[in-house]
Image (cartoon, grey):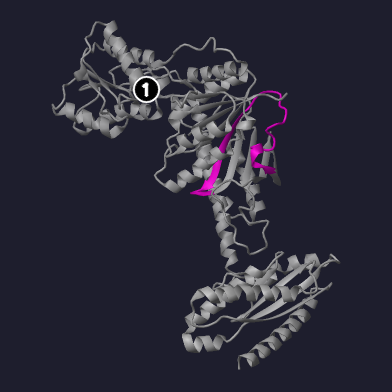
Amino acid sequence: MGRKRIGVILSEAESYYQERLLKGVMTKAFQLDYDVLIFTSFVKVSFLKAVSVGEMQIYDAINYDKLDGVIVLADTLKMPGLFDKICRDIDEKCHVPVVFIDGSYKDYESIYTRDEIPFMQLTEHLIEVHGCRKILFLSGALETATTRERLAGYKRALEKHGIEYDPDFVCFDGGFWYDKAAEVANNIIYGRRKKPDAIVCCGDYMAIGVVHEYQKNGLSVPEDMIVAGYDAIDEAIHCVPAITSCSPPIFETGVNAVMTIEARIKGVEPQGLMEDGGKVEIGASCGCHEDYSYTKRDLLSSQNKMNYHDFLDSNMTDIMACSKDPDDLMARIQYFLYLIIGHERYYLCLNEDCLGEHEIVGEISTVPKEYTENMVLYIRNVDGKSRTLHDPFELKEIFPDLDEERESPCAFFITPVHFIDRCYGYAVLSYGDEIKSIDITYRNWTNHVSNALESMRIRNSIANLAVRDAMTGVYSRIGIEKNIQFVVDRMSNPKNKAFIAVCDLDCLKKINDNFGHNCGDIAIKAIADAVLASTKNNEICARVGGDEFVVIGCNDYNDNYPERFSARVNDRLRVYNKFAGNEFEVSVSIGGICKHITDVHELEDMFTQADKIMYASKLERHKNRK
């Protein structure tokens, strides 16, 4: 029996909160010998709806039948409609234990990051170290579980130190964001709200907003106001002064989620869950000397910064833009995998024919807005050995090596590859059994890959301008030359016959003279549509003159195929004339021939014969009109 798997559904795995939680998930999952499949978009919210469409597609790559448990980071799924979509999918497709983190849905198990004790410790720091008694609690709406947890911690700290709870020093107008918190700070500065000794914020963004508002008004933090935040995000340590904050017990939450999944799989109650942790992180906004292990932590990850600088200096975009064809592009993508430090596996899985390489030359490649039922593995990089492939696999497999036996458990990050709302596919990245999350370098690296795929598609579309007739969209003469090899290749089969039909619009000059050249163009387009719609078996349809079209094919045709083809075209034109509402009738003269040939040069003779048949038909139709 293969190794069990836990699926994790979230957004922005590279963000600090998500990274800490995922480390908890991976640590416990690996101890229990679980693989972890992490389905993540690169953004939580986008101002462009089309970008959200492309990002959200990654969640359609989830095959719940491949998972033994599911963890949903509910609070990260902020794109419009995303949380509801995940919930619907779980209802309809998931038959394994599910745990929601920092959110809930129906009767599914929920685990919340316990903020009460850490927030109490943060408030106690302001009381015990800085002597604050009047502390403003600043938060967003009371209805959120986050606010209620942190408010309870605030109240416990006051009660423990004999400070009476004062509703005037509790404010729910902070909105969990910079601007609303700044408005509250402005009201304090100008006397519209009681001035406290300190402001303890339910989130670092609000704390930063308060600091900036004081500075904007010529005041200083902590000299004129002591400020503390919560969550210990990167923006808090980059603020001047650095925000005194608190790291919530997110790692522990991840561990507890896995332990809960494991218990539910075994049919028992969770035992031995980790106690609430959290750590007060000392910045300078409270008046303390900052703890450099906190405020300079990004400097401690200097390797990540070096990796990002290497990425910026790599000229990756320019070099990939020079790719000659899809295979050349894949080779260049593989080369730049050196920028993803520490990875053990990388798979690039794209939609079928999204680059048009399997279509007849000149076909305009289209990019769907969803994954195709069958995907194609283009790149497989395992332990430094990389190959360009064109291996098809079913979407429900997720990626081809998922079920292979491995010595130790692994985590796989499954991320979208798209350009705006054009869905190219997805990528799978693994650091093996290392407890590590994707980072900003990988996010931007993948964005460069997506842009390169879009650039290749655009170049293919531009190339089509040379082989397509601008008015009708069918092939031009150059298009025939580019595609004729397809016909030639089929001639070697003795069962196949070559087919050529010459189709010429009747009375074009008369239509132009009597109704104008715009109407003549309408008639030409009508003929093109009817002829193209009548083709089968990958036959080539091209415009070879002002009002003349040719169809070329090679297949197992019956001797009467030219007559049947002509009948299909005329049937379509009869329907067109009935409903088009034109003052003129559109008709066509057709000459067709079908025969077995062995040499491509014989096609020229067939064309001459078909042209003569067409001309004879035109003369006969002309006589009948008289």
State the residue at coordinates (69%, 87%): 615
Question: Dot 1: what SS?
Answer: helix
Q: Which residue is mark 1?
A: 145
Q: Amino acid at mark 1?
A: Ala
Q: Position of residue 573 (x, y in %)?
A: 59, 75
Residue 414 x, y percent position in the rendering: 58, 36
The one nearer the camera, 362 or 19, is 362
Compared with 92, 296 (above or below) is: above
Is residue 264 visible in the rendered structure shown here? yes
In the figure, residue 206 lies in which quadrant? top left
Is 332 in front, or is 100? 100
Left or right position of 235 against 226: right
Within the magenta stretch, is there residue 417? yes
Residue lying furthest left in this view? 191
In the picture, which quadrant includes the N terminus? top right
Q: Is residue 7 above or below residue 452?
A: above
**Residue that appears at 46% across and 29% down:** 74
Q: Position of residue 350 (x, y in %)?
A: 62, 46
Across and down, in percent, residue 516 comes to: 47, 85
Q: In the image shown, does 303 or 403 lie closer to the viewer?
A: 403
Magenta span includes 17: no
Residue span colored magenta: 393-422
- Quadrant occupied by the C terminus: bottom right
Among all residues in the image, which is located at the extreme right? 494
Tell me which residue sits at (54%, 38%) in the image: 59
